[in-house]
Amino acid sequence: MRSISKSFLNDIISKYSNDECVIHITDTASKILASSDKSRIGGVSNTALYINKVQRATSMANLDDTKAKFSSVYGVPVYADDELYGTVIVRGQAKTASEIGEKIKTAIETIIAYEKYTNADADHKDMITSLALRIINGDTDREELYSDMYKLDMDPELLRCVIYIKLSYRQNNYFNIKLNLGYSSGIEQFKSRFIEKLSANLYFNSQDIVFMYDYDTALIIKSFIPGPDLSRIYRSLDRICESVAADCSDFKSVGFKIACGSIYASLDDVPKSFREAEELINIGLRSKKDTDIFLPENMLFESLSYYMNSQIKNKIILSTISSLTKKDGHMASDIIDCAEAYVDSCMNVTETAKITGLHRNTINSRLDKLRQMTGLDPSKSFRDAFIIKETAVYIRQNTEES
């Protein structure tokens, strides 16, 4: 009897055994694995030898004179997917013996089928995760990669991109207790539920792969059907990221940040999409961007600052920062923060006041100080406004949080 624990067999015998019957459950060699008669466990059942030979349910008169009160012996083989797993033998009254035998047989076959399904599902998920890692890492054996995808009913010719989810486990009582005791089961259970939730997203299908890449990173390799209008696909990708963020928000025990790479037509370029998404996450975190989704359009200034030409950085940005630094070495952060809010408000003092909570006179005063210290006037020059915005972003990216 494979795949079934003896504790389960003992539990099922306890459920159905009584003074009116004796129950044995054997393996394919007719060895008794569990029995209501504990003295028989480990021995061989002659009835089971017969049932295993004929491989069909059989009722027989009980010829054992020492157990005359049991008028019948019922034996039935246990099968799953046409494979013999053992037998169930019940001694008792004819009708009772056959009823109990069939119930136990059905229960065992059901649990065997469930475990087979569970194991097959786990194996399938392992294969998918292994495939995803090979794609992300740029598996050089293209022919083998394509072959494995076909075996999993996946189309290697679809457009694909990577959606990157960075998780931060919040300090709560549940995780703290688990971690303090040295157990990781709480985190592992969370990861399993998290991936299951994301996989059920209405925008995902059998061609998409959702998996944990490492301890705090989940990845989605999203597929798209090729079309003439790539911009339309990118717009749908934005909506998908918003839907993924909504799924992530259901888990209050973690914070998250989401970014995606470019959409590519070749599997060879999926690692590039992964690196793009990973870098966008890093830029967003470094810039202390107050959003959960880092998209190129809302990370424009942050990306420009991150990839800034060294000559522009040294000659313009660092020069501006130097001009805003007071004699005591402290940055005039109140001035640059106010100026950035003014630029973000399209040089509208009223809107700046709403954003900052500052009085109009205070805003005008700080803008005057900005002009005196740096010579920049965002109200009269787009160039000056751009320099102010990039300076503010650069300061955030290069200032460690206290």
Image: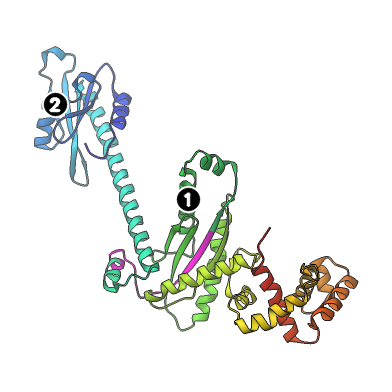
* Front position among marks 2 and 1: 1
Q: Which mark is residue 45?
A: 2
**To which residue does mark 1 refer?**
193
Quarter of the image for residue 78 reads top left
Residue sitting nearer the eye, 68 or 396: 396
Q: Is residue 284 visible?
A: yes
Question: CB under 8 Å between callouts 2 and 1?
Answer: no
- The mark nearer the N terminus, 2 or 1, is 2
Residue at mark 2 to residue at mark 1: CA–CA distance = 45 Å
Could you say whether the residue bearing mark 1 is in a helix, strand or loop? helix
Location of the N terminus (image quadrant): top left
Quarter of the image for residue 282 reads bottom right
The answer to whether residue 6 is magenta is: no
Q: Which range is magenta? A: 149-166
Q: Is residue 276 left or right of residue 80?
A: right
Location of the C terminus (image quadrant): bottom right
Q: Is residue 16 left or right of residue 265?
A: left
Q: Could you tell me residue 391's position as x and y percent?
A: 70, 76
In the depicted structure, whether residue 163 falls above or below residue 126 = below
Q: Which mark is residue 373?
A: none
Extreme residue in the right direction: 361
Q: Is residue 117 left or right of residue 165?
A: left
Residue sitting nearer the eye, 262 or 365: 365
Could you say whether the residue bearing mark 2 is in a helix, strand or loop? loop
Amino acid type of the residue tagged 2 in the rendering = Ser
Q: Could you tell me residue 115's position as x and y percent?
A: 31, 44
Badge 1 crowding class, 10 Å Cα cut-off, few under 14, some 14 to 19, many 20 or more, is: few
Q: Could you tell me residue 175's position as x and y percent?
A: 55, 44
